[in-house]
Image: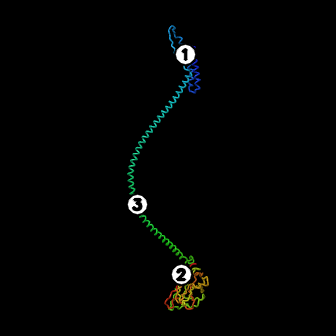
């Protein structure tokens, strides 16, 4: 019997060892359990030995009837047990994994529930706020309509006021515009008057400056002096009592400049500026010889030398007078001879300009008025000195 137990224990150890070797290829994490199976088998062996030793001291009554009942059992296969154990362990691990996943799912559900509860709470708060906002909006709309009607009325009133004020302003602006235009015209007129006054003042200053200068310092074109002589016949006789007299006798002119006859009509001027110009002009009354063509010339006399102004200034020998006329009948004619002379004399020189006359027909001419003393003239002559 002892030998039988020893064999069983050794066989169990071998099975446990084989079981460990069998389980390793299954890649199942049982290495810790399989490592202790041989140790467990040795402990069981020592336990059986201990039982046998103790059993030796147990008294046995050989005379006692002992009935041993044996029950036939089927011993499972070690490999079958191993497969079942592996399957159970795998099922356990899978269930643990599922339990872990389930736990995670439960935790996630709790989290979702908490989030949903928070969302519901926020939704409730939002709903309350929304209801409050809707109530406020409805109140505001009601108040806004009233205020809008009031504003519309105010706007209409204001528009009427603006229209009235605009018309008033436009009327005022038109009046102001007219006033401004009048003021502008007045200002323009004042500016023109001021410009004219300024011009006159400048001219006055210039004249004052000129008047303080000596004649030699005057600018060109300045009038230095003007002389007038009235050639009046003071006698009862229309021919006068002086020689030459106012009734010169003329010969047929025939375009001969030497046929001019001197008259008592003249003007004298004494120059104040070197080489100045002399402007000579005047009025001469002429009673022609039977209406014949007559001629008038001015002649300059300086230091006893007399020069015809017609000859001195003409460009053509056909020019034979300064002024004249052809009345075609016996009548008196006024002529106005004039000339700008350039005698080129030094200052202090006395120059005489005398009227000379000629007639196409020979006869007596009258140069102071009508022969019956019914008409007489002053025959004024002027001489004006101008700075060259």
Q: In what element is the residue under mark 1?
A: helix
> Distance of mark 3 from mark 1, alpha carbons?
129 Å
Query: Quarter holding the C terminus?
Result: bottom right
- Res. 245 in view: no
At horizontal 53% and vertical 81% (from top left) the residue drawn is 226
Residue at numbered disc 2 = 226
Task: Point out the tag, 3 or 2, that comes first from the N-terminus.
Answer: 3
> Distance of mark 1 from mark 2, alpha carbons?
183 Å
Q: In what element is the residue under mark 3?
A: helix
- Res. 87 in view: yes
User: In the rendered structure, are the residues bearing label 3 and label 1 in contact, judged by CB atoms less than 8 Å apart?
Assistant: no
Q: Quadrant of residue 338?
A: bottom right
The answer to whether 163 is drawn above or below residue 292 in the figure is above
Q: Nearer the viewer, residue 45 or 85?
A: 85
Residue at numbered disc 1 = 48
Residue at numbered disc 3 = 163
């Amino acid at each position: 019997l002892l030998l039988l137990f020893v064999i069983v224990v050794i066989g169990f150890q071998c099975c446990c060892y084989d079981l460990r070797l069998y389980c390793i290829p299954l890649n199942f994490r049982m290495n810790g359990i399989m490592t202790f199976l041989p140790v467990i088998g040795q402990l069981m062996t020592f336990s059986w030995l201990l039982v046998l030793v103790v059993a030796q001291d147990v008294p046995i009554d050989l005379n006692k009837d002992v009935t041993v009942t044996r029950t036939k059992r089927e011993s499972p296969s070690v490999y079958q047990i191993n497969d079942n154990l592996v399957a159970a362990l795998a099922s356990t691990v899978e269930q643990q994994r599922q339990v872990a996943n389930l736990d995670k799912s439960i935790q996630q559900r709790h989290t979702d529930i908490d989030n949903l509860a928070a969302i519901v709470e926020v939704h409730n708060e939002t709903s309350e706020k929304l209801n409050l906002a809707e109530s406020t909006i409805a109140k505001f709309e009601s108040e806004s309509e009233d205020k809008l009607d009031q504003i519309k009325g105010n706007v209409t009133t204001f528009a009427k006021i603006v229209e009235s004020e605009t018309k008033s302003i436009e009327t005022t602006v038109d009046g102001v515009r007219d006033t401004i235009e009048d003021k502008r015209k007045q200002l323009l007129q004042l500016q023109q008057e001021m410009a004219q006054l300024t011009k006159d003042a400048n001219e006055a200053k210039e004249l004052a400056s000129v008047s303080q200068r000596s004649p030699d310092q005057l600018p060109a074109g300045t009038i230095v002096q003007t002389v007038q002589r009235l050639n009046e016949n003071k006698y009862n006789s229309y021919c006068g009592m002086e020689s030459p007299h106012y009734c010169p006798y003329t010969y047929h002119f025939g375009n001969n400049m030497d046929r001019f006859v001197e008259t008592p009509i003249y003007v004298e001027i004494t120059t104040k500026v070197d080489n100045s110009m002399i402007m000579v002009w005047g009025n001469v009354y002429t009673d022609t010889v039977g209406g014949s063509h007559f001629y008038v010339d001015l002649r300059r006399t300086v230091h006893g030398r007399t020069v015809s102004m017609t000859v001195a200034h003409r460009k053509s020998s056909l020019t034979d007078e300064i002024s004249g006329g052809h009345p075609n009948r016996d009548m008196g004619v006024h002529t106005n001879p004039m000339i700008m002379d350039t005698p080129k004399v030094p200052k202090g020189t006395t120059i005489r300009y005398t009227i000379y006359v000629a007639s196409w027909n020979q006869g007596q001419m009258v140069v102071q008025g009508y022969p019956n003393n019914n008409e007489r003239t002053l025959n004024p002559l002027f001489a004006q000195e101008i700075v060259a």
